[in-house]
Amino acid sequence: VSIRGPAGDCVLVIGGGAQITASLLRGCGDRAVDITGNDAVLVKNDISFCDNRCVDLEGDRARVEGNTVQMSEDGDCIDIEGDDAVVRKNRIARCDGDGVNI
C-alpha cells in the first residue's frame, strides 16, 4: 500500500494481529503507524516525514523488522510499549527523539 500526506495517522489499527508489510508511508500528519493490540507485525516498510512519532505500537510481542524509518519531526522514530518486542535490521535516521524506545 502507498499512503502520502493525510492530516492524521497514515495507518490506525485497534486490535490484535495487525500486519503492515511492504508499504510506503510518507508525510503523515500525525503518526505513520499507530497500532494498539498484541502481535503487531511491521516488516519491510518505507516510512518517512512524520509529524509525531513515526511508529507507535502498544501491545505485547510486536515485531518490527527490515523497515526504513526516518524524519520523525516531534518524537521517537519507533516507540513500543509492551513485552517481548523484537526490533531488528531496521534503518533509522533523523529522529527528533529516540531512534527506538521500548
Image (spheres, helix red, strand yellow):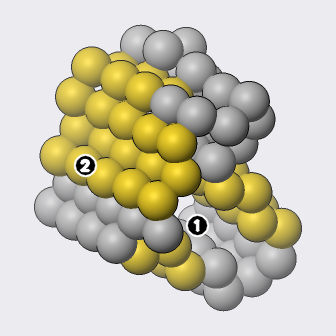
Q: Is residue 3 visible?
A: yes
Residue for point 50% across, 31% down: 27
Task: Give the labeled residue for mark 1.
Answer: 83
Label 1 element class? loop
Residue 59 versus residue 7 in the image, above or below = below
Task: State the image quarter where residue 9 is shown.
Answer: top right
Q: Is residue 8 above or below residue 72?
A: below
Point out residue 2 in the picture as x, y percentages from the top left corner: 46, 59
Q: Nearer the viewer, residue 40 or 3?
A: 3
Which residue shows up at 31% across the image and 32% down it?
70
Mark 2 or mark 1: name the one nearer the start of the chain: 2
Write the residue at 38% across / 35% down: 48
Left or right for 11, reference 55: right
In this figure, which residue is indicated by the disc labeled 2?
A: 68
Q: Residue furthest right?
A: 14
Q: Residues within 10 Å of mark 1 (few under 14, many from 20)?
A: few
Q: Is residue 19 left or right of residue 67?
A: right
**Viewer-closest of 80 and 18:** 18
Q: Evaluate whether residue 101 shows in this view.
A: no
Residue 23's disc number: none
Residue 94 picture quarter: top left
